[in-house]
Amino acid sequence: MFRSHRSRTTVLRDILRGLPEAVTVFGLESAWLVVGARGIFVVTEDCGDLGAAALHAAEIAEEVRFKLSDELVWVPFIDPMCATTAVVFEPDQPCLIIPLDLVATTVSDGPGTIDDETLATLRLLGYPVLT
């Protein structure tokens, strides 16, 4: 009936591990940084407080964008998102709220927005890579 935060995080981690090889996933302190041709995403997970998790994703995305400005001449937009198993629609959240089962599609499908040179530089970030 009740699932722990750890089990949901493991599901998200497994989803991110299953992304195509062209997508690199970095582990941040309390979120994931997903880098691929489709964009850059900071992904958090709703663990009982959707508003706090969404705000946290937006804050981390802003921090990462600021840090990347030291590394890149042009910093792509970083999409903050919060994955959830809850069926909610809260349009006033500071980031995209997506169902957990749509994370992979959201970050890996669609048109490319980041060029190969920028992707190569981003893959050299000093964050730990999810393996």
Image (spheres, rainbow, N blue to C red):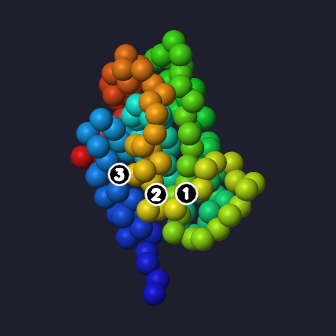
Residue tagged by mark 1?
98
3D distance between C-alphas at marks 1 and 3: 14 Å
Q: Amino acid at mark 2?
A: Leu
3D distance between C-alphas at marks 2 and 3: 11 Å
Element type where label 1 sits in the image: strand
Q: Are marks 1 and 2 in contact (CB under 8 Å)?
A: yes
Question: Where is 127 relative to 49, above or below?
Answer: above
Is residue 9 or residue 39 the one in the foreground? 39
The nearer-to-camera label among 2 and 3 is 2
Q: Which mark is residue 16?
A: 3
Is residue 83 or residue 64 the one in the foreground? 83
Is residue 94 or residue 67 the one in the foreground? 94
Give coordinates of residue 64: x percent, y percent: 52, 33
Is residue 119 or residue 130 the one in the foreground? 119
Answer few, some or many: residues within 10 Å of disc 3's Cα (few below 14, many 20 plus, some between 14 and 19). Answer: many
Q: Amino acid at mark 3?
A: Leu
Residue tagged by mark 2?
102
